[in-house]
Amino acid sequence: MLRVAAVRARPLRAVASYSTRASQVYVNASEVPLVRTDFHAETRIWTLQFLGQETKDHRLTHSMIQQGLLPALRDVRRQWEQWVEAREMEPGAALVTTAPVDSKFFSNGLDLQNALRDRHFFNDCLNALTRELLTFPIPTVAAIGGHAFAAGCSLALAHDYRVMNAQRGYLCMNEIEFGAPIPRGMLGAIQSVATKAAQRKLLLEAHRFTAADAEAYGLVHTTAQGTEATLHKALALAEQVRSRAAKGAWQSIKEALNADALAMQYEPPRARPPLAL
């Protein structure tokens, strides 16, 4: 029997049972659920879902990254590495990142003030997350059911594939509207995907890309009608591409393709917090 477990610094605690999938809930130090992973054994696809209980718009806080997203991704990576060692890579595997289907947001970006107060935030948190995705050993699909702003946008772009809701939500980098520079790590993720024309509209114009715009500019691979359809299409795409990891070369080829973006996942720590925002 597979178990749903809440994951924290101390041993796992079972909270429910499932016969066809394993689930884990990752919580912060205050026991607030951050993200959940579900493993679909019949397809070898994980879903990684924001839970919206720390922030309703799924902001990339310190704890969301360090106690939620990174541990979840690394547990998936660890399972894949065990399959590689046992030569059990067939029929491949994949991961889909999503928000709840009733949410208006995929992710609304950073908890900016707290991020800027920590001179090591970008290297220890955000860049570590981007690096994890840019080197992930199995295909990743972002199911963008709602708005993806700023770091939420770069998070989506760090995935290998993107499916976007045509009925609701924008992809947008709006830093220019409030006078913030683009951190190197986020820029690396964007440049790994976006053409020069798309970069200009994203970064210098703060253009709000609808799903149709994003598909036309090559920022997403396909669109769907509604949040549930977006998730279903992302899962279908994940099942379609999962076999690309089955021979064990997905990670090494992806790292070669993303070499420039990976080199940008370090930036000198900020000397001190800004005096005002």
Image (cartoon, rainbow, N blue to C red):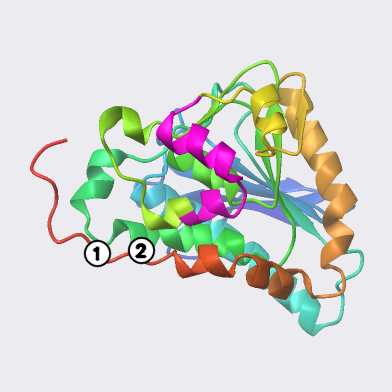
In the picture, the quarter occupied by the N terminus is bottom right
Q: Outermost residue, bottom direction?
A: 85
Q: Is residue 235 magenta?
A: no
Q: Nearer the viewer, residue 42 or 210?
A: 210
In which quarter of the view is residue 268 placed? bottom left
Image side of residue 113 versus residue 144, left or right: left
Q: Which segment is the magenta one?
A: 188-207
Is residue 211 shown left or right of residue 12?
Answer: right
Is label 1 in contact with label 2 (beta carbons under 8 Å)?
yes
Per the image, is 203 magenta? yes
Within 10 Å of disc 1 (Cα), the crowding (few <14, some 14-19, many 20+) is few
User: For the residues marked 1 and 2, what is the alpha-carbon distance in whole angstroms?
Assistant: 8 Å
Type of the residue with mark 1 = Pro
Residue marked by disc 2: 123
- The spot of residue 113 in percent (x, y) is 23, 40
| 167 lies above or below 77 | above
The residue located at (49%, 56%) in the rendering is 188
Which label number is shown at residue 269? 1
Vertical position of residue 76 compared to residue 240: above or below: below
Magenta stretch, main secondary structure class: helix
The image position of residue 76, as x and y in percent, is 66, 63
Residue at (58, 43) in percent of width and height: 156
Residue at the outermost front position? 197
Looking at the rendered structure, the secondary structure element under dot 1 is loop
Looking at the image, is 103 positioned above or below residue 32? above
Q: Where is residue 252 in the image (x, y as percent from the top left)?
A: 70, 75
Q: How crowded is mark 2: few (under 14 residues within 10 Å), some or many (20 or more)?
A: some
Say if 245 sits above or below 81 in the image: above
